[in-house]
Amino acid sequence: MTDERLRRWRLVLGGDADGTGCALGGVDAQMDGALAALYGGGEGGREGGERSAGLGGSAPRVARWLGDIRSYFPSTVVQVMQKDAVERLNLTRLLLEPEMLEAVEPDVHLVGTLLSLNRVMPEKARESARALVAKVVADLERRLTQKTKAAVTGALDRAAKTNRPRRVADIDWDRTIRANLHNYLPERGTVVPSRLVGYGRRQRAVQREVVLCIDQSGSMAASVVYSSVFGAVLASMRSLKTSLVVFDTSIVDLTEQLHDPVELLFGTQLGGGTDINRAIAYCQGLITRPTDSIFVLISDLYEGGVRQEMLRRVAQMTAAGVQVIVLLALSDEGAPFYDHENAAALAALGVPAFACTPDAFPGLMAAAIERRDVGVWAERELGVAAT
């Protein structure tokens, strides 16, 4: 085994040189100490041959550690270590300290943790927390806005078909040729179109109503963050009428805050129970044009309300022509825990339930706007069979 491989295994395994025969020094020893403080073991975390890892409860010490790991590891690794530190070492309380918030690497999971502390956050930490959330939101908007608008705009254009396009630029040549293959003239090697298929003129009026209904129970933190950003992007498009509702056992309509996703996120309250039926009942009242509406329920489907009534309301919506979609999660992690029985009951109603990544969400919205089978779309694009 090469020295480099031994070095890497030594950093992975921790402990001392006895196991791998590889001693660490310099920056490697400092990296090992940072890892030992969180995961235990390692030369940097030992005194007198005994393990003494751990970050303790000192905010200055944790802040220094956060600065260290940002200098030793790439941001993607730093985010994982921060998440592990919060979960393994119970550092939630320290996140209420401004110096801690200034030291961390902003990411979606950290935003979710801060939002869950929103109601107990002291005023001195609120400004730092808001700045951190704003940075994450701005990064997500840069990443997702253009793709979302392009996918939705294209889908709206494709959905507005006409057999009387007014301009040559409005003709969909692929569909026109396919529709006129029976008019092919072999002697001239061409198709004579007797019927044109084209795009309708882009309408300035609202073409679709979109209602995002988001479960804000603690397990849905990342989904709440992503959904809020997507809601703000969709609300900026004049051809869509977008509403955003968050719920646990109570319901909060945050549609008026869609212009400011940071303010919107601070209007959520992560944690608590879940009453999906009550939330769906409220959202039904927001839909004025069922056949032109898309209702997206983002929830792990653990219902604390009346289950049969929830299913009855979903059946009513689909019968009225609403395109109903259930996302078990809108995050990069998938949906490890959800109510399988409720997911199966929804599937029996023709409503697919699956987890969706943020990068795939624009394509999902495009498929829904064109009224394609989103279950088939999920299987093809995400490689998962909708429940």
Image: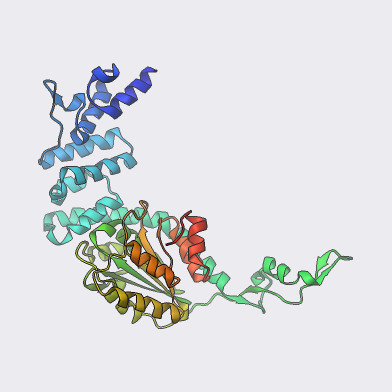
| Quadrant assignment for the C terminus | bottom left
For the image, the number of numbered tags is 0
Relative to 291, is 37 on the left or the right? left
Instruction: Kindly tell me whether residue 236 is visible in this rendering.
Output: no
Residue 133: quarter of image: bottom left
Q: Position of residue 110 (x, y in %)?
A: 25, 51
Residue 177: quarter of image: bottom right
Instruction: Kindly tell me whether residue 129 is visible in this rendering.
Output: yes
Residue nearer the viewer, 331 or 303: 303
Q: Position of residue 131 (x, y in %)?
A: 24, 54
Q: Position of residue 363 (x, y in %)?
A: 48, 61
| Quadrant assignment for the N terminus | top left
Q: At x 79% / y 71%, what residue is drawn?
A: 182
Colouring used for the render = rainbow
Q: Is residue 251 above or below residue 386?
A: below
**Which residue is outermost to the right?**
187
Q: Is residue 335 above or below residue 323?
A: above
Residue nearer the viewer, 269 or 306: 306
Q: At x 42% / y 68%, what residue is drawn?
A: 347
Q: At x 46% / y 74%, what residue is drawn?
A: 239
Residue nearer the viewer, 59 or 283: 283
Q: Position of residue 67 (x, y in %)?
A: 22, 37
